[in-house]
Image: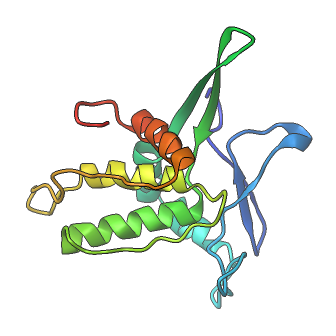
Amino acid sequence: KKRSLVHFAVDTDECFMTTKLAGKKTRYLPFNLGHNDGAGNPPNKEGYRTAYLWEQVWARDSMMDILGKFLHLSVEEYELGGIKKKKEAMSFPRYHQLDVVRKLTRDARKNGAGVNYLVQHSAGSGKSNSIAWLSYRLSSLHTSYNQRVFDSVIVITDRRVLDNQLQATIYQFEHKDGVV
């Protein structure tokens, strides 16, 4: 919360990120494009496989978008032995989350409401944050004529664990009337 927002570990082929350095306990998450329906990055005829990082992600407009609309401090309150505690963690989007939210937002701005999409995430890949970031973006999405695209955004899930997690995540993103 006081210094770095995110740390990247990058070589010519792959990229990983973390928001908290903890020595040997540091947990790095992949920040790759994916290749052939799997991990890693596709070949790049014009340079390094990780060139997307500085060419797209770290580009000025992209970083301003990440800082303004993706980055947030997640706060989880819990009780341990009768004492209330807080666990805070900085949330920075992984590449697949950033990509899906931007693509769906761009398409919704272009095509409006009424289009169906299917987003596939694997277990532990950050579904709750992807849904929360997308909901947040869509709830304030306007056309080039400054007209709202959606009157409301409703998130429905059939999983109780994800339901509670989603409620807490979305609520942390947006504290205003109408967010339930």
Give the side of residue 2 with respect to residue 65, left or right.
right
Q: Name the residue: 42% across, 41% down.
A: 170
Left or right of 59 in this view: 52: right
Report the residue at 47% width, 70% height from top. 119
Quadrant for residue 47, please give it.
bottom right
x then y, percent, for residue 112: 18, 69
Q: Is residue 28 above or below residue 75?
A: below
119 over 98 or under it: above or below: below
Residue 65 image position (x, y, % from top left): 41, 52
Q: Provide residue 16's location: percent of width, then percent of height.
A: 73, 59
Q: Is residue 7 above or below residue 87?
A: below
Q: Residue furthest bottom?
A: 45
Q: For the view shown, which residue lies furthest in the right direction?
A: 24
* Outermost residue, top side: 82
Where's the C terminus, which quadrant?
Answer: top left
Residue in the foreground of this view, choosing between 160 and 118: 160
Position of 111 with respect to 103 (left or right) is: left
Nearest the eye: 72 or 131: 131
* Nearest the eye: 61 or 91: 91
Q: Residue at x 54, y 33 (%)?
A: 73
Q: Which quarter shows the N terminus?
A: top right
Count of numbered circles on the image: 0
Q: Position of residue 117 (x, y in %)?
A: 36, 74
Task: Find residue 51 and report its image quarter.
Answer: bottom right
Q: Residue at x 44, y 39 (%)?
A: 167
Task: Judge from the rendering whether residue 159 lies leftward or rightward of residue 34; answer left or right.
Answer: left
